[in-house]
């Protein structure tokens, strides 16, 4: 089984899981792989939109259902949680749509919204629209970034495997830094 066939078979699942757990980097990588012809852009987009949507729905439901639990109470002690609630009170629809585009608000915001009085149906609709826009934007950025990488690769002439391994290593380093940052904040 070749590297390309693994990407073609499991790439959309990786983008889906990456969009759920990390976010932009996985979706950008999906767009880049689409440009390289290793993953259909529609699969990268659907994986990104579904992962983002389901992740945010999960955190919203956790905030709504378990608002009095110790785990959610720990989230409420964070500065970002209070700021998310203030922004939600001031700009409810805009904040629900835009929190995924704001650095540092990706996980805390759906929990905060879940603890608020925002109806679940309202969050569901706005979240679906926002996840679609977000996935479109970051998949397209990854695709366009793929053009730049392809042009650079044409000048440097590395093999496709070398190029993909370089992207994978950079992505792995980024994920490692994110895990270390999360671990220190605990």
Image: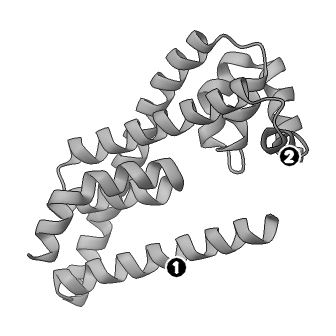
**With 120 as the anchor, is 81 left or right in this view?**
right
Crowding at label 1, few (<14), some or many (≥20) Cα neighbours within 10 Å? few
The image quadrant where one finds the C terminus is bottom right
Q: Nearer the viewer, mark 2 or mark 1?
A: 2
Q: Residue at x 37, y 38 (%)?
A: 136
Q: Is residue 119 left or right of residue 144?
A: right
Question: Is any atom of residue 89 visible in this view?
Answer: yes
Q: Position of residue 127 (x, y in %)?
A: 53, 25
Indicate the quadrant where residue 75 lies: top right
State which quadrant residue 155 falls in.
bottom left
* Residue ID for mark 2: 74
Can you give x and y, in whole percent of width and height, for residue 30 in the image? 32, 56
Horizontal side of 134 relative to 159 (left or right) equals right
Mark number, residue 173: 1
One can see residue 144 in this view: no
Q: Secondary structure at mark 1?
A: helix
- Determine the CA span between mark 2 and mark 1: 28 Å
Q: Is residue 155 above or below residue 52?
A: below
> Is 81 situated above or below 176?
above
């Amino acid at each position: 089984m070749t590297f390309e066939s693994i990407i073609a078979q499991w790439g959309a699942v990786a983008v889906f899981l990456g969009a759920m757990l990390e976010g932009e980097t996985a979706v950008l990588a999906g767009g880049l792989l689409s440009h390289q012809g290793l993953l259909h852009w529609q699969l990268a987009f659907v994986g990104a939109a579904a992962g983002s949507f389901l992740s945010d729905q999960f955190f919203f439901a956790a905030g709504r259902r378990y608002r009095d639990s110790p785990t959610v109470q720990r989230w409420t002690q964070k500065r970002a949680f209070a700021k998310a609630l203030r922004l939600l009170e001031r700009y409810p629809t805009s904040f629900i749509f835009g929190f995924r585009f704001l650095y540092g608000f990706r996980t805390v915001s759906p929990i905060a919204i879940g603890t608020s009085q925002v109806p679940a149906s309202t969050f569901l609709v706005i979240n679906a629209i926002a996840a679609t826009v977000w996935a479109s934007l970051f998949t397209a950025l990854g695709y366009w970034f793929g053009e730049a990488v392809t042009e650079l690769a044409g000048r440097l002439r590395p093999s496709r495997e070398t190029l993909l391994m370089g992207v994978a290593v950079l992505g792995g380093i980024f994920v490692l830094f994110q895990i270390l940052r999360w671990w220190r904040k605990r």
